[in-house]
Image: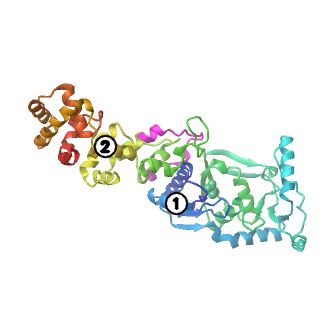
Amino acid sequence: MLRFAPSPTGDMHIGNLRVAIFNYIVAKQRNEKFLLRIEDTDKERNIEGKDKEIIELLKKFHIEYDNVVYQSQNLSFHQNFAKKLLEEEKAFACFCTKEELEKEKEKAKKEKRAYRYSGKCENITLDEALKRDEPFVVRIKKPKEIVEFEDILKEKMKFEPNDIDSFVILRANETPTYNFACAIDDMLYDISLIIRGEDHLSNTPKQIHIQKSLGYTKKIEYCHLPIILNQDGKKMSKRDRASSVKWLLEEGFLPEAIINYLILLGNKTPKEIFTLKEAIEWFDIKKLSKNSPKFDIDKLRFINRAHINLMDDKNLATLLGFNEEDIGKLAKIYLEEASTLKELKEKIDKIFAKREILEEFKKESEILKSFILKYRDIEDFNEFKKIVSNKSGLKGKRFFKPLRLLLTGSEHGPEISKIYPILRKYIKRIIK
Ligand code: GLU
């Protein structure tokens, strides 16, 4: 089984969505189940409603899973496994105060070395601990040997026991830390491959150490994805608005285009424009670049235009708030100067909005209006143009400028000859 394990602590990041897409694709390729696990054990960081938002987003992107589980449902497992480790003396109760630990961290910082737990409580037995009747956290004892694992995209990874350290697995309020809950759940659900961001690389040996300590011998495969960078070469953060999936959708990027772009990013694909279904046919996780890819919004805009162009005309019209298939056709012509649904909607809405006629062409506009209405049944633009120009006596700039303004509400745009055949059908709605 594969899994996507988001925390409901903020807006979904494009890096998370990329992780979800890859897990989904590989699950389909391997014919394995796909689990959505909402990692909600850190109650202080959870944001109300973010779980629902994640579920809705996955639906919008057509990323289907076989089951959804909230990590907090497994609390009793987490607590019981911590207890087992305590009883087997693979973990110990730690009574060190926050102040004490802070002091040690400060000291390590001053001495320019990485902080490690002092080992002060390591020899307190469980009996002793329970007798104390004071709150404590549970720390797992650091491993005795190097922890190694293979990663699909990296060289063999090796971690020294000291770097793994004796870390906290259960907080004083008896809730599990991320690494503990994650390691237990991956075991409980028989996860075969974990695809996640590179930022979790140092968590992996901790999770393997937890599982080994509990006697779990199955080898889980790992694939840590390089972090997506912004144009300045820095990790994409909240400050980069395009890092938020919600923002991209609000801006009018299609889910299909976002998926296409995220699969293309840092990858070698047989073609540039494709659907998720097609990607399942040829996607190869091993071919992903080992280097961090740079997010390029212009490329995403290009891909978005391609997917809008592939859409059914009627569906496109609906997304823009219209009913007629023709409006979808019209919008596609406007793709030469717009890339998102939001930009297209602005263009189309302007056509149907109340006109602001330039003072300079007021007289011409009045004359033109009646002739446009009169000859709108002429399908061919050249013919229409000839007749209206002749009858109105207007030529050149004095003809074309007010004509464009009357028909489109803008001074610039696609060639009138391209959009006129559609616009003429709506003249009465356009020229009020
Ligand atoms: N809850 C973690 C996160 O959102 C996921 C960790 C994992 O995939 O193991 O970063």
Q: How packed is label 1: few (under 14 Cα within 10 Å), some, or many (20 or more)?
A: some
Q: How is the image coloured?
A: rainbow
Q: In which quarter of the view is residue 205 placed?
A: bottom right
Q: Is residue 94 above or below residue 307?
A: below
Estimate the x, y position of residue 59 in percent, counting from the top left: 46, 60
Q: Which residue is mark 1?
A: 53
**For residue 284: magenta?**
yes
Q: Amino acid at mark 1?
A: Glu
x, y percent for residue 209: 75, 58
Between circles 1 and 2, the one closer to the viewer is 2
Label 1 SS: helix
Establish whether ligand 1 lies closer than 8 Å to the Cβ of label 1: no
- The residue at 41%/39% (across/down) is 302
Quarter for ligand 1? Answer: bottom right
**Over which residues does the magenta segment extend?**
279-301
The reply to whether the residue tagged 2 has its Cβ within 8 angstroms of ligand 1 is no
Image x and y of residue 89, in percent: 84, 67
Horizontal placement of 320 versus 172: left or right?
Answer: left
Amino acid type at image mark 2: Lys
